[in-house]
Amino acid sequence: MADKEATVYIIDLGLSMASRQNGRDESNLDWGMRYVWDKISTTVAASRKTWNVGVVGVRTDETDNPLASQEEGCEGYEHISVLQELGPMTMRNLGTLRGRVKPSNTQAGDCISAVVLAIEMIEKFTKKLKYNRKIILVTDGEAPIDGSDTSDISEKMKGSNIQLTVLGIDFDDAEYGFKEEDKAVTKEQNEEILRDLVEKCDGLYGTMAEAISELEMPRTKSVKPYKTYDGLLTLGDPDVHADAMSINVERYFKTHKATVPPASRVVMKTTSDHNPADIAEATDGDEMQGVEPTPNFSAVKDARTYKVNDPSAPGGKRDVDRDGLAKGYEYGRTAVHISESDYNLIKIETTKGFSIVGFVYQEKYEFFLNMGETCMTIAQKFNDAAALKLSSFIHSLHELESYAVARIVTKDGKEPALVLLAPHIEPDFECLYDVPLPFAEDVRSYPFPPLDKIVTVQGNTITDNHRNLPSHELQEAMNDYVDAMDISSWEKDDEGNRTMEYATVEDLFSPPLHRINQVIRHRATYPSEPIPPTPAILLKYASPPEDLVSKAKSDLEDLIEKASVKKVPPKAKGKRDKSDKPKPISGLDIDALLRHPGNTRAKISPDKAIPEFKQKVELADDQADIEDAIKQMRTIIQDMVTKSFGDQDYDRAIEHIGVMRETTIEYEYPDLFNSFIKDFKTRLLSGEFGGDRRELWWKIKQVRLGLIDENASEHSNVLTEEALAFLKR
């Protein structure tokens, strides 16, 4: 069961809270409410009915609280109002509360009396049940406070197990390092009274500046243990062999991906929709599932229909029920139907179990085989025999430096999985960590050339003095740079020495998760204000530490020199100009080499059509040479389609057509491609390329390789409407 909480916020709304002090551009109230709104919006986002919030305003213009309404004891509770009764907090309550929190026109009101009222509210709401009880007081301490009963009040709070937190606007805090100069005598006295009260009831006391500075620090959500398996861990079959190992264990998540909050699809209501009848109707019948109804949004409800082709039905399609559908599994370009009855027969029947199938030495296990999330297995609670057995097994694995491989089925009918069990031993805790192992189909093996040697065509092995192999000097420079960028001990300790690890797992927070949570809380509290900037803590590890980069600068410069790193000229954009080409870094005249009689090609090879086509166009002296290249490419594409076995070469043909289209646009000859694609479409649809090839034209339409219109090239005479019509026909 989730922990129950009852928190009452006491907010000072006196006239002095409207002032701006210490160079701030917002009032004391707005500045202090940053903390309160953040905490309340976090409670709203959690959407737990057991987390209850109450808000009390002190130094308000009016008096609205149950203690002041009593016939006796009314004195001292004036100008205190209950702004929000203790109970679950919703977005609607948050909006109402936001309109009531504003500075008053009075200085009267006692914060200590407000604390007494908060104690009364908590005791009345929680009774004797188990709750986490909290009172949070936010004040600037400018109004007189009666501290005569602090001892009795502190005893009452300790007896009721209520934690008091006092956050003062510009309160002195030696631990945080803040002290306000020229402080009023009344405020100094009030700080002493409140500090004394907090110390007596073992509460928390601090300045608001420290509390606000910690708001940007991401807060990790405390998650209760989730049991993924509860049963026997076996080695051998206990039903067959009497000496088989059998241990009662429980398995829990150790790591589990934290996801961002889900978003519901809604539509904003228009101004005309905000009449009482529409709002009532929305509340009754337009609720989003699991979401609090609101007059500002309308729920978007999904409706899915299934249709099949039926020439006899109106419109040529007929609706079918979802129950009448069947599963069809892809098989090539067709589908294979397997009925539910057949599927139940072919499905692997599994029973719940956790059994060890073998062992592997730690040194022989490859860690890149780890897949998925980590779980931990412990002995069954309150079972000493199981704890002793599991401890013996864990220590055996540890002493033999081995891992266990186990098959696990968490529930009857679930798919089986193989996991690797690793022993973990601490002074007061022992467990088995497990990670999923891949099946043969999950492993991706790719042939990559080695990095430390070159194998020639003749089979010779070269290990040095090759342009693709690092020299000894380059290797040393890279080693020095890697050592210089080492962050394993870059973090400073309390004494300022760099002995601690930088970027530990405990300090690494998920930027998308915490950023979206921050934005949601801000927008819920301030609907019309702009989104705040990303907190620095979320961007801390987006780049290396600046001081570390400065330290390694000389090693980086040496590495750049040894590796002969040079800046590559940016790729020119726009029209191709042969007279102004980027010069290669080597200084070689590539055009002169390609124009050499021995390197020129009069005919484009079908096997290397794309590079040779580009080369021929690049070296063309006039339009006739480009037309010849287009003509050869046209012949190659038509021959490729004609000889294609089914759709085997369709993708290659589409790639060739795409290259031809891009090249004619780049060299400003769109008419050459347009004439080709018109002729190609006519002959393709008429069956001149070895039969019915209409599927190829459908694929060409999908990638939109139609006519080059005036939007694609200013030299084209084809209108956009003509190009669209050409693809539709």
Image (cartoon, grey):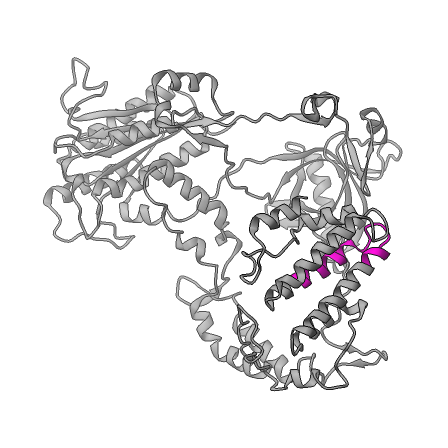
The foreground one among 358 and 459 is 459
Q: Is residue 648 magenta?
A: yes
How many discs mark residues in the rendered view? 0
- When the figure is inspected, residue 718 is found, relative to residue 54, above or below; the finding is below
At x 54%, y 35%, the residue is 224
Taking the view exactly as shown, the residue that stands out farthest to the top is 71
The foreground one among 296 and 377 is 296
From the viewer's perspective, tell me whether residue 359 is left or right of residue 66: right
- When the figure is inspected, residue 524 is found, relative to residue 563, above or below; the finding is above
- When the figure is inspected, residue 33 is found, relative to residue 118, above or below; the finding is below
Residue 556 seen by the camera? yes
Residue 53 seen by the camera? no
Q: Which residues are magenta?
A: 640-661
Question: Is the magenta region chiefly helix, strand or loop?
Answer: helix
- When the figure is inspected, residue 421 is found, relative to residue 571, above or below; the finding is above
> What x and y, as percent, mark residue 85?
31, 23
> What x and y, as percent, mark residue 103?
18, 35
At x 21%, y 49%, the residue is 25
Q: Is residue 602 magenta?
A: no
From the viewer's perspective, tell me whether residue 480 is left or right of residue 243: left
> What x and y, as percent, mark residue 398?
71, 53
> What x and y, as percent, mark residue 284?
45, 16
From the viewer's perspective, tell me whether residue 147 is left or right of residue 534: left
